[in-house]
Image (cartoon, rainbow, N blue to C red):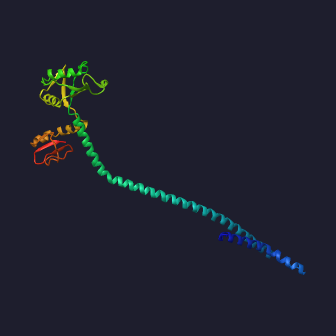
Amino acid sequence: MPSDKTAGKHSRQLLFSEAIAQPNTMAAQMAPQGHVSPLVDQPSLEATDHILQEIASVGRRLEVMDLKITDLTLASSSICADIAGFRETVTNLDQRLSAVEDHVAAIPDQEEELRSLRAKLTDLEDRSRRDNVRFFGIPEQKEGSDIKAFLSSLLTDHFSMEFSPPPEFQRVHRIGPPHKASANKPCPIIACFLRHEQARQVISTAKTRRPVSVDGHEIRVAADFLRLTNDRRRAFLALRPQLRSLDIKYGLFEPALRFLDPLPSHPYIRSHPRSNHCSLF
């Protein structure tokens, strides 16, 4: 069944054809009866031609409008398809935004969990180094081919330590690249003792036997901690004068629970409840 648009176009074409053919039809009807067509004046003919031209122009414009309407219909269909695609994109973006908002809302809990895991990891790694002792200032190549025997001799001869049984090591080696070492700053030696008690004995005795020198080089001994722990210790040492002025005992005590009230807040200092002690955590 033809559409209204097609029917309208067909009607306009039919009227246009009838308007053009009407004068000829009237003449053909009057000729067989013997009538003579009266003369038509020139202005009437010109007016008729003008009307016919206008009708033809309107028909052409209507055809152009039909083409434009068709183009607009196609464009409208394309726009509707684009809008449907935009709606789908907006829906996907809304879902992703909701997922991001949920993730952002969970970040504080994740950060707290991450801090807790980092603290546990730091504590575990520091505990795994409890049997390690670092020796600083020993000249390069001074240990010879047997570094364990050299270290045992260093402890008994220079630090005057007595061990029962003799010190035993799991591993002993220098730390750092050799090409960066110099006569004034040799690479440190790290020793992993077989017995934890001997490692603690070396550290505690070395504090009371300072200074100890080998070939004019001062030897220092320290426990083996992570860099983060060493940074916290250095920050704690900077507060020692203030702690002493307040007559507060300090040290590495556990557990550490809250800030000291008389001291300014510091990220590495905590105090023990119901005591006048503070500690580094």
Can you say which quadrant of the picture contains the N terminus?
Answer: bottom right
Q: Nearer the viewer, residue 62 or 49?
A: 62
Residue 152 seen in the current view: yes
**Residue reaching furthest to the front:** 165
* Residue 14: % across, % down: 74, 72
* Residue 113: % across, % down: 28, 48
Left or right for 258, reference 49: left
The answer to which image quadrant residue 52 occupies is: bottom right
Q: Nearer the viewer, residue 4 or 37?
A: 4
The answer to which image quadrant residue 256 occupies is: top left
Can you say which quadrant of the picture contains the C terminus?
Answer: top left
Q: Height in image: 47 above or below 169?
A: below
**Residue reaching furthest to the left:** 247
Residue 41 seen in the current view: no
Left or right for 242, reference 129: left
Residue at x-position 11% and y-position 28%: 208
Q: Nearer the viewer, residue 195 or 31?
A: 195
